[in-house]
Image (cartoon, grey):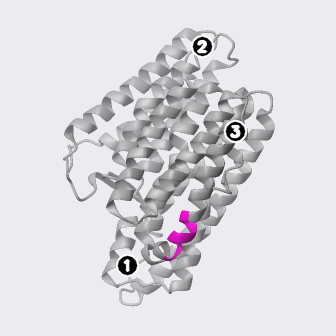
């Protein structure tokens, strides 16, 4: 479906444009800066509501597709679309952002313009992660999201902000490097397989094209290779969502982060992992997912019980929410790796539910 205008791009880039506009305002006009940032998030929410109203219910294919060649010699595209997997996460991002901006309205916040700009940039990267249908585009937004998040924690955080920001960066970046290796390997193998019958094929990072070729048998992965690439994605997403035992960065970050940033990190950024498991691990590596499901399910069950029990022993409210959040995220993983429609629908529902309730608790 198309509206004749790039609605997804408007939603995606409007917060980034707002961040740039903030620096055109005089440094001393803090009230104007805060008002502008809030208006930008509200306008983005209005565009997202428009997307909700025109979205065709029951559409089985990606909608509002936008495709522009980015690096044609490598098959990289600026490719955006929405479907039943990412639609509600886009809406969640648009809905939560005004509350995060409002939470930064304090006379005790130093350099509010920089903080507001980083919050808006963070929202743009979140939209990019959920909208991207090209693996390289997804990875770019996935990594870019780490930059404003780390600065928000490290500059405006609490007492242990530097240590928390460092741990946050090292954990998530290490997982991202592994995923990048998996993306490159998948691209190379797919290009070799399709290029054998079509010498003009330069390769592609299009998730739907690769998945389609896997389903049709035009591209086949050796089971051991499939499992290796599957794990390169799994570890990256496990760290981001806080799957046990990759969760240890979560309590430290949640305790140190400023409330405005914490709302976005806890409510939305943690969903990068669960969304990635559905979008990539289950879609591109179904056999490996089935093979790994019992082990991942055991880790998730341990995480549910361990984090829930640990939450009872905390004295700090942020750490209570942090450990309970880890428990809930592990519930979502358990639903995903049930590998059936009920589990996936429940996981998607819980992703949105967890985002709303966690943001409300931190507010």
Q: Which residue is mark 3?
A: 253
Looking at the rendered structure, the secondary structure element under dot 3 is helix
**Mark closest to the chain's N terminus, 1 or 3:** 1
Q: Position of residue 134 (x, y in %)?
A: 43, 60
Q: Nearer the viewer, residue 65 or 253?
A: 253
Where does the magenta region start and end?
A: 291-297
Q: Residue at x 19, y 47 (%)?
A: 56
Which mark sits nearer the N-terminus, 3 or 2? 2
Q: Position of residue 248 (x, y in %)?
A: 71, 49
User: What is the number of callouts on the image?
Assistant: 3
Q: According to the image, label 1 marks what residue?
A: 214
| Residue 308: quadrant of the picture | top right
Q: Position of residue 181 (x, y in %)?
A: 61, 69
User: What secondary structure characterizes most of the magenta part?
Assistant: helix
Q: Is residue 342 visible?
A: yes
The mark lying in front, picked from 1 and 2, is 1
Disc 1 to disc 3, C-alpha distance: 39 Å
The residue that disc 2 covers is 26
294 in magenta: yes
Separation of residues labelled 3 and 2 (CA atoms): 32 Å
Q: Residues within 10 Å of mark 2 (few under 14, many from 20)?
A: few
User: Whole-Å distance between the Cαs marked 1 and 2?
Assistant: 54 Å
Secondary structure of residue under mark 1: helix
Whichever of callouts 1 and 2 sits on the residue coming sooner in the sequence is 2
Q: Is residue 68 left or right of residue 160?
A: left
The answer to whether 44 is drawn above or below residue 204 in the figure is: above
Instruction: Give the answer, above or below, for where 234 lies relative to 124.
Output: below
Quadrant in the rendering for residue 236: bottom right
Closer to viewer: mark 3 or mark 2: 3
Residue 268: assigned label? none
Between 153 and 266, the one lying in front of the other is 266
Viewer-proximal residue among 49 and 311? 311
């Amino acid at each position: 479906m198309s509206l004749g205008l790039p609605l997804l791009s408007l939603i995606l880039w409007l917060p980034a444009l707002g961040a740039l506009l903030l620096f055109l305002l005089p440094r001393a006009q803090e009230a104007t800066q805060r008002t502008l940032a809030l208006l930008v998030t509200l306008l983005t929410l209005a565009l997202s509501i428009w997307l909700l109203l025109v979205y065709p219910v029951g559409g089985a294919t990606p909608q509002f597709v936008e495709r522009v060649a980015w690096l044609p010699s490598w098959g990289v595209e600026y490719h955006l679309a929405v479907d039943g997997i990412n639609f509600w996460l886009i809406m969640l991002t648009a809905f939560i952002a005004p509350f995060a901006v409002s939470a930064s309205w304090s006379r005790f916040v130093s350099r509010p313009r920089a903080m507001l700009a980083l919050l808006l940039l963070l929202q743009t990267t979140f939209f990019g992660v959920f909208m991207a249908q090209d693996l390289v585009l997804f990875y770019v937004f996935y990594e870019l999201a780490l930059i404003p998040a780390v600065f928000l924690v490290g500059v405006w955080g609490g007492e242990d902000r530097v240590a928390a920001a460092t741990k946050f960066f090292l954990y998530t970046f290490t997982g991202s490097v592994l995923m990048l290796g998996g993306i490159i390997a998948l691209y190379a193998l797919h290009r070799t397989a399709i290029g054998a019958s079509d010498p003009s094929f330069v390769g592609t990072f299009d998730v739907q094209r690769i998945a389609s070729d896997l389903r049709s048998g035009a591209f086949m992965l050796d089971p051991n290779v499939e499992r290796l690439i599957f794990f390169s994605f799994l570890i990256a997403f496990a760290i981001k969502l806080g799957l046990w035992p990759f969760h240890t960065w979560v309590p430290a970050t949640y305790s140190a982060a400023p409330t405005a940033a914490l709302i976005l990190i806890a409510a939305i950024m943690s969903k990068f992992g669960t969304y990635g498991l559905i979008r990539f691990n289950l879609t591109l590596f179904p056999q490996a997912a089935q093979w790994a499901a019992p082990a991942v399910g055991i880790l998730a069950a341990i995480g549910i019980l361990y984090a829930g029990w640990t939450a009872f022993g905390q004295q700090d409210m942020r750490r209570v929410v942090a450990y309970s959040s880890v428990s809930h995220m592990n519930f979502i993983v358990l639903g995903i790796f049930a590998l059936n429609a009920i589990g996936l629908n429940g996981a998607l529902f819980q992703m949105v539910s967890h985002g709303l309730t966690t943001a409300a608790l931190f507010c």
